[in-house]
Amino acid sequence: MAGSQEKLAASLEVLEALQKGGRSAIRSADLGRTHRERLLQAGFLQEVIKGWCVPASPGAVVGDGTAWLASFWSFCATYLEARFGSDWSLSPEQSLLLQVGDWAVPRQLLVRSPKARNKITALAHDASIVETRAALPAEGHAEELAGLRTFALPAALVAATPSFFRQQANAARAALAGIPDASEVLVLLLGGGRSTVAGRLAGGLRHIGRRGVADEIVAAMRGAGYDVREKDPFAEPSPFVVASREAPWVARMRLRWHGMREVVASQFPSPPGLPIESGAYLKAMDAAYVEDAYHSLSIEGYQVTPQLIERVRGGAWDPERHPPDAAQRDALAARGYYESFEAVKETVADILAGKNPGVAVRDDHGDWHRALIALSVRAGILGTAELAGYRTGQVFIRNARHVPPRPSAVRDLMPTLFDLLSEEEKPAVRAVLGHFLFVFIHPYMDGNGRLGRFLMNAMLASGGYPWCVVPTGRRNEYMAALEAASVADDIRPFARFVGALIA
């Protein structure tokens, strides 16, 4: 007779087969009652709604929503396909958010279908699906993104409500920036006689500096006999002119930077300026190292002590002569932090000597990352591919509604981030927005939080501000402030948080 462990193993084999088939939304019928109940009890499944589960980690603490939040979009794609077949689409507004790279988990996911029952389905962790009986995108004007049926960008702009342009201004501006010319929009506007929408889109395009496209829309509509009254749909001026086409996720990041910079500057004291004697600044960095390493590693979940950090820095930790040391994940992380800190010191020295801070970090951040993780790679804790550079897979942040950009977008966003850092005049803005957008992008599979804090401190050094240690005791406040900036475009809590630490 099979024991409990053998039975659990058999159930895990069934779950593994489903996951290998690409399933992250698991229906009860897919598993059978016995397997489902066994996996739920062992913590390998988490129920989202009756009859539907997602894979989970049995080691997760009660209330941890990471597994669910990481599965949200794939769950919704599978669930909606089961409910409506192919007759459904995300709303135009939600489609636009995904089109510009905003994959944050919404509180309410708006879905259209001719089969909809105009109801709300409550999901786990304060999320829900709101299904409405409304028009789907016309043939040829739909697009599938990661298994989700969406309005293509031009169709979504035509169908979006006026309130979207006020409530999600940066996303709307970025979407407008992604239109190469007027043709795809005009097909929909002329076919439906959408003169009011034409006026709104023309006004929005002129708002971001796309005058030629705006003129073309107005001229074509008037040429067809429609009375077009152009109107700017945005409540506030654009932070800058988006005069040429670029990837929407890049335009959105530029818009956020320019829209947030003055808010950040208002939370900081004036910069002291570069020190005359850089040696004193670098000595102060060294003096802060143990405290910084302890808190930065602890924030990421490593179990370290100041004693371990000193032992690692002083060379008493010796994996070559003492094999048990090589197996200590926390000690490997501490040694990697020390090696990376030393590399950051070299970058800071260049900045203090007058090198452009954005260029300095652009040139050196890959060295920081390799130093941070090399020992863990050699020990087999991390894969060798981690040393190759920016990530090629999707990552998720524990308990965060923010979902980092797709890997393909990372390669557009990182050069843009360094351009923004290089062009920015205010050190405080470089520090706060540099850290925020680095961890927003999450360019690596591992080490993003530590590297983000290094980047922040390199930028603080460029203004003569002191080295900033984020206390592990304030981790929740720190993470909540970053989440507010990521999901709600509210940088004030994070700017206030960092500003208070260096005051």
Image: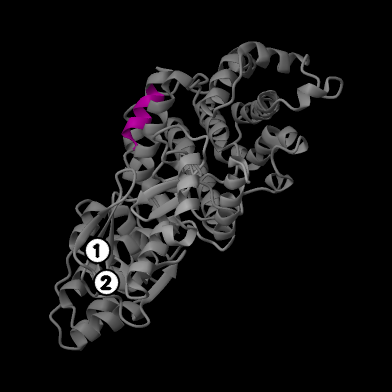
Q: Is residue 498 magenta?
A: yes
Residue at image point 37% right, 30% down: 495
Eyeballing the image, is 215 above or below 49? below
Residue at image point 56% right, 30% down: 454
Categorize mark 1 by other alpha carbons within 10 Å: few (<14), some (14-19), many (20+): many
Q: Which residues are magenta?
A: 491-499
- Residue closer to the observer: 141 or 170: 141
> In this figure, what is the number of numbered marks?
2
Q: Is residue 367 left or right of residue 281?
A: right
Which residue is denoted by mark 2 in the rendering?
Answer: 113
- Residue closer to the observer: 229 or 95: 95
Picture coordinates of residue 288, whole percent (x, y): 58, 15
Q: Secondary structure at mark 1?
A: strand
- Closer to the chain start, of discs 1 and 2, is 2
Picture coordinates of residue 178, whole percent (x, y): 40, 66
Residue at image point 24% right, 66% down: 160
Which residue is denoted by mark 1 in the rendering?
Answer: 131
Picture coordinates of residue 437, whole percent (x, y): 46, 42
Which mark identifies residue 391? none
| Prevailing SS of the magenta stretch | helix
Pointer 1 with pointer 2, Cβ within 8 A:
yes
Q: Amino acid at mark 2?
A: Ser
Q: CA distance from mark 1 to mark 2?
A: 7 Å
Q: Secondary structure at mark 2?
A: loop
Q: Is residue 71 magenta?
A: no
Eyeballing the image, is 33 above or below 80? above
